[in-house]
Image (cartoon, grey):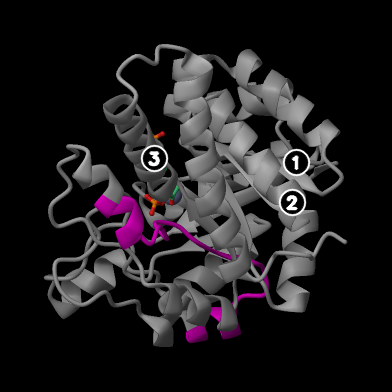
């Protein structure tokens, strides 16, 4: 069933679990999300970035995403991830997305508020939910205290941002970053900051850059030739803690890309005579589905759509 992020996240916040937002790039990533969420009976967010929209075209993407949502017995929202301007937001809303993120995190505080508020006014008039972002998802491992403060979300600023924009959800920066190389040393998230933000804001909070870069996925990919030295993600126990402290939407992209790549490498290496795209991509779909299923169990969203 088609749902909005606002609907999914208000239940998740009350019940204390997180909904996974999985980035799709093609039919196979979408099918992996559909199959895992149906089997797990888990609410789910299907997300597409502006670069995926450029790659596939918004109409093609929205077409398969809407078909997916209408065909499953669980609530599924169709979400624009990291929208950067009003034009992309409007294109996605017109195509049938039920939720958009406006990422003004590179702008000044006032610039971010002004762009986000403009998107909120337009999206809310069409029943579409909006996620904003405050703070930046940059690696802060080797940063000084001042540098960290400039990057991580300031709780007082978050309070003001939420009041002035009326966003439905807020992405916060706690020390995670996008991609497969998140930490050189010990993975660390600023949980004290999360606790304060949770106290000062009263809307669902979002964790980006949450991939775990699981060792079994890395081992398979590297066994078949991938070069991923130094890849490191967020340990499951940190994700669990973030959920317990009030994160209710978690974004995953990298872990699916890694599973996709490892599986295709393995299949091509082990079956040199195979050239049927459905067999090659079908194996990748199965590998991604396994990752998505494990995330749903970790986030606590399995069996929440019964
Ligand atoms: O923020 C989301 C992604 O991990 C980066 O996605 O390569 O589709 O822009 P993209
Ligand atoms: P990862 O790169 O950790 O999967 O994060 C994805 C993300 O935040 C998409 O918005
Ligand atoms: Zn992100």
In primary-sequence order, the first of circles 3 and 1 is 1
Label drawn at residue 128:
1
Label drawn at residue 39:
2
Mark 1 neighbour density, 10 Å: few (under 14) some (14–19) many (20 or more)? many
Q: Regarding mark 3 in the picture, which secondary structure is present there?
A: helix
Query: Mark 2 to mark 3: distance in Å?
Result: 21 Å
85 or 237, nearer to the observer: 237
* Residue 86 seen in the current view: no
67 or 93, nearer to the observer: 67
Instruction: From the image, state whether disc 2 or disc 3 is nearer to you.
Output: 2
Query: Mark 3 to mark 1: distance in Å?
Result: 28 Å
Q: Position of residue 184 (x, y in %)?
A: 14, 66
Q: Is residue 231 left or right of residue 163?
A: left
Was residue 198 drawn as part of the magenta stretch in this picture? yes
Picture quarter with ligand 1: top left
Q: Is residue 12 left or right of residue 32?
A: right
Disc 3 and disc 1 in contact, CB within 8 angstroms: no
């Amino acid at each position: 069933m088609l749902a909005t992020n606002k609907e999914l996240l208000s239940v998740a916040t009350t019940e204390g679990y997180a909904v996974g937002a999985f980035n799709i790039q093609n039919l196979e990533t979408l099918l992996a999300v559909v199959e895992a969420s149906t089997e797990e009976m888990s609410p789910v967010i299907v997300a597409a970035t502006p670069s995926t929209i450029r790659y596939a075209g918004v109409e093609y993407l929205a077409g398969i995403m809407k078909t997916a949502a209408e065909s499953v017995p669980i609530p599924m929202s169709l979400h624009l991830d990291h929208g950067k301007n009003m034009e992309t937001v409007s294109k996605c809303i017109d195509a049938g997305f039920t939720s958009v993120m406006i990422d003004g995190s590179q702008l000044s505080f006032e610039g971010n508020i002004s762009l986000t508020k403009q998107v909120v006014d337009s999206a809310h008039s069409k029943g579409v939910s909006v996620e904003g972002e405050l703070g930046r998802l940059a690696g802060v491992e080797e940063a000084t205290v001042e540098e960290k403060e400039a990057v991580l979300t300031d709780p007082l600023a978050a309070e003001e941002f939420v009041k002035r924009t009326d966003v439905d959800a807020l992405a916060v920066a706690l020390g995670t970053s996008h991609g497969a190389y998140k930490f050189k040393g010990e993975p660390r998230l600023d949980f004290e900051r999360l606790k304060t933000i949770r106290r000062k804001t009263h809307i669902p909070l979002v964790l980006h850059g949450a991939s775990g870069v699981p060792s079994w996925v890395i081992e398979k990919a590297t066994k078949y030739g991938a070069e991923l030295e130094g890849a490191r993600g967020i340990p499951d126990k940190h994700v669990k803690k973030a959920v317990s402290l009030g994160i209710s939407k978690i974004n995953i992209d990298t872990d699916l890309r890694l599973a996709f790549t490892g599986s295709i490498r393995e299949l091509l290496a082990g079956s040199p005579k195979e050239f049927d795209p459905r067999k090659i991509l079908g194996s990748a779909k199965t590998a991604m589905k396994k990752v998505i299923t494990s995330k749903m169990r970790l986030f606590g969203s399995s069996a929440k759509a019964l």
